[in-house]
Image (cartoon, rainbow, N blue to C red):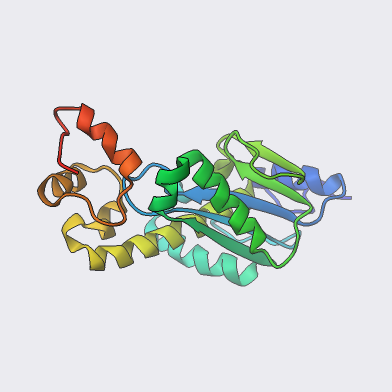
Amino acid sequence: MEKDFFGKGALFRYETELYLKGYRLIAGVDEAGRGPLAGPVVAAAVIFKPGTEIEGVNDSKKLSPKKREYLFYEIRRKALTYGIGMIPNTRIDEVNILRATFEAMRRAVSRLSIEPDFILIDGRDEPFDKKEQMSIIKGDSLSYSIAAASILAKVTRDKLMNFYGRIYPEYNFTVNKGYATPEHIGAIKDHGRCQIHRMSFMLKFEKDPQLHFQI
């Protein structure tokens, strides 16, 4: 069996090794939006048929918005199946961002139309019970499946934040996507928080006199 049967290049290392061990339905999982002050955390899961290779797939952070947008539709078109999971800011405040991220990942996998026989996850944690899995630090730069999931998660969340940007134009979510940019912090100082802000994230700013604002 050819070593590169699953795909060519360094990004297929983990998928190829798993394929050679007999796994066929390998899901990549990643998230977007763990760090922002506002909006949901979004996770994506994706499974490809062995041999599927979409040119340009890489860690979503290394791609331009235009390239991510193109790949977003190509991945959805060529994947065997994909799933998206979103956890809102209110739930993040209830359980903390780590647990909310795990919930988003589990939700994304539950929405796959095919049950994976192995899951590759970006990061250091293994959030799935009773499933064969591997966590890979910086996995979105090392695994094709995880990189594809990172694109799906990032573009999905960006589209949602663009929608919120029209509802709450004073915060300019279409540009900052909810991250703690100086402009965003200034808008919170001027207008207070809105319904999609994460209280648990914003409270830390009360302790910093340079960033203090009323919540």
Of residues 15 and 94, the one drawn nearer to the viewer in this rendering: 94
Residue at (56, 56) in percent of width and height: 44
Q: Is residue 16 above or below residue 74?
A: above
Outermost residue, left side: 190
Q: Is residue 1 left or right of residue 82?
A: right
The picture places residue 88, in percent across and down from the top left corner, at 42, 55
Q: Residue at x 52, y 52 (%)?
A: 150
Q: Residue at x 52, y 46 (%)?
A: 101
Judge from the rendering whether residue 134 lies leftward or rightward of residue 43; answer left or right.
right
Q: Is residue 58 visible?
A: no
At x 44%, y 64%, the residue is: 69
Q: In the rendered view, tell whether residue 69 sits above or below residue 40.
A: below
Q: Nearer the viewer, residue 2 or 194?
A: 194
Looking at the picture, how far across and down is residue 186, in whole percent? 14, 45
Residue 31 vs 68, above or below: the answer is above
> In the visual, does 26 lie left or right of 170?
right
How many marks are shown on the rendered structure?
Answer: 0
Q: Position of residue 17 (x, y in %)?
A: 79, 42
Q: Is residue 21 visible?
A: yes
Check the picture and name the quadrant holding the C terminus. top left
Q: Residue furthest bottom?
A: 77
Left or right, residue 113 beside residue 191: right
Q: Quadrant of residue 108?
A: bottom right
Q: Nearer the viewer, residue 129 or 132?
A: 129
> Where residue 120 appears, x then y in whole percent?
67, 45
